[in-house]
Image (cartoon, rainbow, N blue to C red):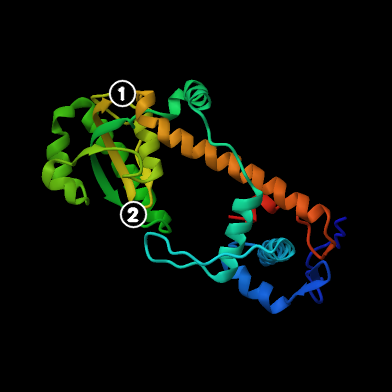
């Protein structure tokens, strides 16, 4: 039976005591654990930390009940487990047994998610940057007005783009006529990428593109569409993903089962097990 006291942490007064089968989890330990649970809300960070420590205590008690022991091991980068981490790993390896994804399951996932398995689109791009600080409204307006004028001129004389970039752009690419070469996902800021996805090759974006750097006049020279990858190239990636998903689901169910036969106060483990056990 899980006994839950709510709210988990009061905004006024002392935190609600947290315990697992009568074993108290100290507030000082929860406070230290909060550094590993980023949240804009301090109470949410506290709750996440309390849940994490409660789950570790559940696992500790179950390992002790079953007499599970393990020697710490090191990973390929030389990081060594703590004794508690080794014990939890051994317990989970013993109690949470999940089947590996077979080829049929991988094939089904591939067929249902073909769009996810393709090379990224590439863009050959040139731009003219008119700089303006993000918080300077006057500079932003002036840069936008100037960019709109230049876009109008380039509509009439598109062949002047490189010369105009050399004269007006604040980007180092100005010495190459504004040419950025081939760029792919993640190589530019989000607003710039979003604009490229709407453009046709050999055109200039009809409006200035605003980013934290200023206002951009963007010309798309060419788009190289991504291509679908063959199943053989992504089979292992799919298998790893499916194995991880199944393992997390099984682990969540295991912790929920342990919590269901424990007496837990001050924290709700029902909604958190899958998030907090790695």
Residue 213: which disc? none
The front one of 270 and 143 is 270
Is there any visible trace of residue 22 in the rendered image?
yes
Residue 60 is left or right of residue 219, and the answer is right
Which secondary structure lies at badge 2? loop
Instruction: Give the mark nearer the N terminus: 1 vs 2.
Output: 2
Which secondary structure lies at badge 1? loop
Image: 161 above or below 257: above
The picture quadrant where one finds residue 264 is: bottom right
Could you say where residue 98 lies in the image, as x and y percent from the top left?
Answer: 60, 40
Q: Nearer the viewer, mark 1 or mark 2?
A: 1
Could you say where residue 257 lies in the image, as x and y percent from the top left?
Answer: 77, 50
What is the C-alpha distance between the residues marked 1 and 2? 27 Å
> What residue is disc 1 on?
200
Could you say where residue 114 lies in the image, as x and y percent from the top left?
Answer: 45, 23
Residue 37 is left or right of residue 75, and the answer is right
> What residue is disc 2 on?
132
Q: Residue at 69% of width from left, 62% of height from top?
A: 63
Residue 250 is left or right of residue 79, and the answer is right
The quadrant of the image that shows the C terminus is: bottom right
The front one of 268 and 57 is 57
Could you say where residue 235 lies in the image, as x and y percent from the top left?
Answer: 41, 30
């Amino acid at each position: 039976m899980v006994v839950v006291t709510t709210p988990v942490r009061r905004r006024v007064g002392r935190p609600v005591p947290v315990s697992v089968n009568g074993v108290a989890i100290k507030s000082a330990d929860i406070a230290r654990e909060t550094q590993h649970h980023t949240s804009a809300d301090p109470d949410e960070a506290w709750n996440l930390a309390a849940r994490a420590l409660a789950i570790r205590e559940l696992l500790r008690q179950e390992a002790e009940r079953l007499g599970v022991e393990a020697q710490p091991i090191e990973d390929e980068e030389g990081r060594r487990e703590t004794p508690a981490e080794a014990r939890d790993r051994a317990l989970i390896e013993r109690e949470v047994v999940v089947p590996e994804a077979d080829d049929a399951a991988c094939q089904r996932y591939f067929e249902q998610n073909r769009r996810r398995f393709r090379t990224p689109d590439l863009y050959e791009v040139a731009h003219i940057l008119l700089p303006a600080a993000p918080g300077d409204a006057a500079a932003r307006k002036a840069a936008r007005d100037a960019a709109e004028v230049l876009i109008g001129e380039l509509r009439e004389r598109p062949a002047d783009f490189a010369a105009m970039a050399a004269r007006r752009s604040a980007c180092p690419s100005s010495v190459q006529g504004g040419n950025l070469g081939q760029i792919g996902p993640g190589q530019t800021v989000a607003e710039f990428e979003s604009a490229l996805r709407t453009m046709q090759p050999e055109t200039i974006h009809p409006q200035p593109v605003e980013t934290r750097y200023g206002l951009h006049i963007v010309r798309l020279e060419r788009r190289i569409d991504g291509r679908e990858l063959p199943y053989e190239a992504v089979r292992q990636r799919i298998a790893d993903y499916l194995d991880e998903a199944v393992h997390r689901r099984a682990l969540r169910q295991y912790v929920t089962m342990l919590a269901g036969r424990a007496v837990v106060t001050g924290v709700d483990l029902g909604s958190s097990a899958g998030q907090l056990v790695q």
